[in-house]
Amino acid sequence: MKWVFGVAILMAVPLWCVHQPAMPDYPAHLASYWLIAGGPSKFYHLAWAFLPNLAGEIVVPLLSKIVGLDFAARLFMTSGLMLWVIGPALVQRALFGRAGIAALFAAFFAYNANFVWGFLNYDFAMGLVFVVFAAWIATEDRRTKLHLVGFALAATAIYFSHLFALAVLGLLLVSYELGRPWRRMAEAGAIFAPAALCFLFLKPQGAAGDGVTFNLLTTAFDRLDAMIQIDFDDPSYVLIAVLAVLFATGLWRGWLVMHSRMRVPLIALALATVFMPEWAMGGWGVHMRLPAVLGALAFASCEFRLDRNAARVLAASAALVLVYNVFALTRDWLVYDRQFAEFRAVARALPVGTRLMTVLDGDAIGFRSDQPYWHMAELAIPERGAFTPLLFTTRDQHIVQIDPPWQGIAAASAEQGSPPDIDELADLAASRIDEDEDIKNVFPYLMRFQCKYDVAVVIHQGGPRAQVPKMLKPRHEGSFFSLYDIVPDAACRTP
C-alpha cells in the first residue's frame, strides 16, 4: 500500500503549486470559510443548523485558527483528493487481499468533474465513503457490535458532510449484501439509523429544495465528461475510451478478473449513473456525481492476471499517464492562478464593504470557459469585507446567510447562481423582462442593478470588448477583467 500513498501525494501536487486552484466554486467556499472563522461583515451572518452539507464549513474554519485560511482550505481539498486514491485501493485490498495495478487505474478518476468544479463537501464525503465501504468488506466475517457502532458513527459523519454521499454508501452496502443472510442486510440498515433520525428530526424545513429535473438526453454527454477531467471543462475522452476498452477487453480475455460480490453493486451504480437527475434537493450537477465513482469502483473491484513483464509495462504506462495528468492540471491552474492573484491585488484597493457584481462579456470571452470566473468576485469578501450576490447563502442549505437589508439583491437559489452577460445590462437597468426570459427567472435580483451595487467586475479575457452601458465608469483595466464604478441614474430616484 505504500505506493498508493505515493500516488495520492503526487496527485495532490497541483493544489500546492498554486495559491488559488481554478475551481469555479472555490472562491465562494473560501469566502464562506472566512466568514465562519470570524471574518467581520456588515452584509452576512451565521445561522448554524444541522445541515447535511457541513464538511468544509466545520473543518476549514477550525484548522484556519492554527495554519491560516488558505492553507487550511488546501489541506481539506488535499485530504478529499487523496481519499479518492486511497479509498478504492483499500476496497481492492479488502476484496483480494492486496492493492494491485487495477487500483492505479482507479486513481485516474480522482480528477473528475466534481473535483474540478470545486464541489468540495461532496468530494471529501465520497472519499470517506470509499474508505467506509472498504472497511465494511474487510470486517465481513468478524463484525461485532462495536464495529457496528463505529460504522454508525462514520455514516453519521458522512451524512453531515454531504447527504448524497451517504445515499451512495447506502446503495453500495445494500447491493453488496443483496442475497446474503438477512442478518447482514439488517446490520447494513442499522448503521444508517442515527443519520436517518437526523434527517427526519434535525434537518431544517425546506432544505431538500424544490423539485427534481432529469434531462436525461441533454445531459448524457455531461455524465461521460464527468468521469475524468484534467482541467476545467476539458473531458479526457481519449483516456476514458482507453480505460473503457482496457476494462472490457480485460474481462473478455481474462486478463482482468472481477470479484463476484461486486457485480450487483456495479450494476446498481451504473443504473444510478444513467438515470440520476440533473437537479435535485435544490442543487445542480447531481448527474455528475456518480460517473467517476463508477469508474473508480469498477477497477477497484477487479484484479489483473498478467505475467510479470506485462504487468510492469501496464503499471509503468499508467504511472506515466498519471504524471502527465498532474503536470497538465498544474500547468492549467498556474495560468488561472496568475489571473486570480491579479484580481486579489486590485480588490485590496477597494473600499471596505464594496458591493460587487460580476458580468460576463460573452463575445470577448468567445469559446473559452467562463465558469472559473463566476465566483471570482467572492475573493473580495475576505480581502475587503465586500458583498457579492453569488455567495452560497441559500436558506436552509448553507450556514452563511444574508442580513435582511441585502437579501433582495442576491441570488436566492442555485438556478440564479450565474452572472449576467454584458448585453443584458441595459434590460436589467430598465427592468425590462419581455426581451429575455433570464431577466425574470435567473436575474430578478439584478433589476435596477445600478441602484444596488457599487462596482461591476466585467470578465472579457482579453478579447474585443463589448460596449458598456453609460452608468458604468472605468475604474481599473486589468489583463482579463475590468472594474467599473456603477453610477446611479434617474431611475434610482423614482419611488
Image (spheres, helix red, strand yellow):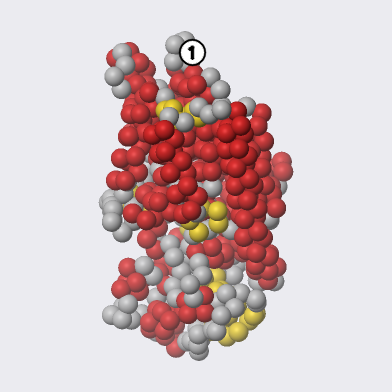
Which residue is labeled 1 in the image? 146
**Can residue 233 be seen from the camera position used here?**
yes
Question: From the viewer's perspective, is 325 left or right of 432?
Answer: right
Q: Nearer the viewer, residue 129 or 414?
A: 129
Q: Nearer the viewer, residue 268 or 387?
A: 268
Secondary element type, mark 1: helix
At horizontal 44% and vertical 88% (from top left) the residue drawn is: 490
At horizontal 55% and vertical 53% (from top left) the residue drawn is: 230
Question: From the viewer's perspective, is 14 left or right of 29?
Answer: right
At horizontal 62% and vertical 60% (from top left) the residue drawn is: 332
* Up/down of 69 relative to 148, above or below: below
Q: Nearer the viewer, residue 458 or 234?
A: 234
* Up/down of 48 relative to 198, above or below: below
Question: From the viewer's perspective, is 189 left or right of 75?
Answer: left
Picture coordinates of residue 196, whole percent (x, y)? 36, 30
At horizontal 38% and vertical 48% (from top left) the residue drawn is: 286
Picture coordinates of residue 360, whole percent (x, y)? 49, 74
Picture coordinates of residue 314, whole percent (x, y)? 57, 38
Quarter that holds the N terminus: top right
Quarter of image, res 20: bottom right
Picture coordinates of residue 39, whole percent (x, y)? 63, 53
